[in-house]
């Protein structure tokens, strides 16, 4: 039998270890739909939380939003999606990839759509955010949420799905200032890639030529990634001009001009849009973190995940599970870590020998394993209240005081 490909290994690990399952699997699956399991949701949440913290909470010029997935269908007519959001089929016919969705009953039924990009809800709330938060230009609105596209050929695991998630910013600027903002977001996207552990050498920019850009875009850079199946789009950065706000002004009849209170100026801002697919990000992370090596004469598989996004931050265990004094101490350490490191998963695994436990944690990318042994209890008085901290990538172990553990881990995972 042939050696499995890297993609096959990733898909298999993702399922076996509870990251990602085929959607509706017991019914034979459903093409283009995937379910995130217990570890997948932790990884996903870490990626989204880091994005939210970086681009919303730690900035004064950004505001968050969670708009409804289903919008008045007139909005998608105005934005050009009803006419233009289409892919060519094999016979050359254009196929609109927006999912239709009946809303209401009987004669009252309206055909709405599942949003194909989260951006739409941001433009519809531009005025609400401006009127409630009174931001000064330039400012941005950020949203994380599901998007849906009836892709003709879903493929490559979670790369091209029919239901996926986006992290999007619409950054509103004075028209003359678009280039500076575009460059700023371009470097922010590289910084975020680095923060989540994507190797810079696998990330490439592609200036998208005019005839291949989306109907709303005046300039687009695709951030491409070297996936195991080739170099493909990971994220996009687009300059949408005033296309959307102007189109929704026409479509809705509402004024979406920005009123500058200081110099009494009224204008329609232009928009820079960094758009990041969560699922493609996860696939890029899994592909670049997957490693196989030999440790202590044994083959092992591990995920070299950046500690800040790893689903499980640390595993705590007693050296032997049948020694109540070790178990009790280990439980104490674990609950101490749980309370000092909130919003993290601190796992427990006392099954089998210690080598097996390490392998299991390596395979899911847990950066640290903490073992409580007899020295922790004071068998060697000089080591009382210390533990063994083992590092995933190197397998190296060090002795650390329990009182230093939280600070040590916090530094590594922040
Ligand atoms: N608002 C801009 C926009 O939606 P896009 O290039 O069509 O632009 C943005 O999509 C990002 O969303 C892509 O770079 C990709 O990360 C993700 N994405 C798009 N279609 C996808 C699909 N079918 N499956 C998974 N992710 C997808």
Image (cartoon, rainbow, N blue to C red):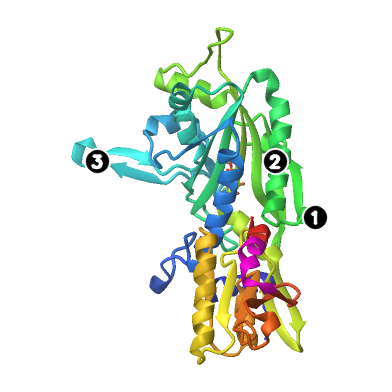
**Residue 274: x %, y % from top left:** 63, 39
Q: Which residue is mark 1?
A: 201
- Asked if residue 403 is among those painted magenta in the image, a careful observer would answer yes
**Residue 109: x %, y % from top left:** 25, 38
The residue that appears at 44% across and 21% down in the rendered structure is 131
Q: Which residues are magenta?
A: 400-409
Q: Which mark is residue 188?
A: 2
Mark 1 or mark 3: name the one nearer the start of the chain.
Answer: 3
The residue that appears at 50% across and 22% down in the rendered structure is 134
Mark 3 or mark 2: name the one nearer the start of the chain.
Answer: 3
Near-viewer residue (216 or 261): 261
Residue 391 visible in the displayed image: no
Q: Which residue is mark 3?
A: 104
Instruction: Please determine whether, in this image, residue 219 is positioned above or below residue 257.
Output: below
Badge 1: few (under 14), some or many (20 or more) residues near its Cα, within 10 Å? few
Badge 3: few (under 14), some or many (20 or more) residues near its Cα, within 10 Å? few
The residue that appears at 61% across and 63% down in the rendered structure is 406
Badge 2: few (under 14), some or many (20 or more) residues near its Cα, within 10 Å? some
Q: CA distance from mark 3 to mark 2?
A: 43 Å
- Give the SS element for disc 2: helix
Instruction: Please determine whether, in this image, residue 312 is positioned above or below residue 175.
Output: below
Q: CA distance from mark 1 to mark 3?
A: 51 Å
**Residue 361: x %, y % from top left:** 61, 76
Q: Residue furthest left?
A: 106
């Amino acid at each position: 039998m042939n050696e499995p490909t890297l993609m096959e290994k990733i898909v298999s690990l993702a399922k076996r270890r509870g990251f990602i399952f085929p959607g509706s699997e017991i019914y034979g699956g459903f093409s283009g739909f995937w379910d995130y399991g217990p570890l997948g949701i932790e990884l996903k949440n870490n990626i989204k939380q880091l994005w939210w913290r970086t681009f919303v909470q730690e900035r004064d010029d950004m505001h968050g939003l969670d708009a409804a997935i289903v919008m008045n269908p007139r909005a998608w007519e105005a934005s050009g999606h009803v006419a233009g959001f289409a892919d060519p089929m094999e016979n050359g016919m254009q196929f609109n990839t927006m999912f239709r969705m009946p809303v209401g009953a009987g004669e009252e039924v309206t055909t709405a759509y599942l949003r194909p990009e989260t951006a739409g809800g941001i433009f519809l709330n531009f005025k609400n955010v401006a009127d409630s938060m009174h931001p000064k230009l330039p400012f941005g609105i950020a949203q994380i949420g599901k998007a849906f596209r009836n892709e003709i050929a879903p493929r490559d695991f979670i790369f091209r799905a029919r239901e996926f998630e986006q992290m999007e910013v619409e950054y509103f600027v004075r028209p003359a200032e678009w280039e500076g903002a575009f460059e700023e977001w371009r470097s922010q996207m590289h910084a975020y890639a680095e923060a989540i552990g994507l190797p810079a050498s696998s990330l490439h920019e592609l200036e998208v030529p005019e005839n291949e850009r989306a109907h709303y875009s005046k300039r687009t850079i695709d951030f491409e990634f070297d996936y195991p199946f080739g170099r493909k789009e990971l994220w996009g950065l687009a300059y949408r001009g005033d296309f959307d706000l102007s189109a929704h002004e026409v479509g809705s009849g509402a004024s979406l001009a920005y009123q500058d209170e200081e110099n009494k100026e009224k204008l329609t801002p232009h928009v820079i849009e960094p758009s990041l697919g969560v699922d493609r990000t996860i696939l890029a992370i899994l592909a670049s973190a997957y490693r196989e090596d030999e440790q202590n004469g044994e083959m092992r598989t591990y995920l070299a995940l950046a500690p800040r996004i790893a689903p499980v931050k640390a595993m705590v265990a007693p050296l032997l599970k049948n020694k109540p004094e070790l178990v009790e101490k280990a439980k104490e350490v674990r609950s101490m870590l749980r309370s000092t490191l909130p919003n993290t998963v601190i796992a427990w695994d006392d099954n089998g020998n210690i080598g097996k436990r390490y392998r299991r944690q390596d395979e899911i990318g847990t950066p640290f394993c903490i073992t409580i042994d007899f020295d922790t209890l004071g068998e060697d008085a000089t080591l009382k209240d210390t533990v063994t901290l083992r590092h995933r990538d190197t397998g190296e172990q060090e002795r650390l005081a329990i009182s230093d553990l939280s600070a040590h881990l916090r530094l590594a995972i922040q």
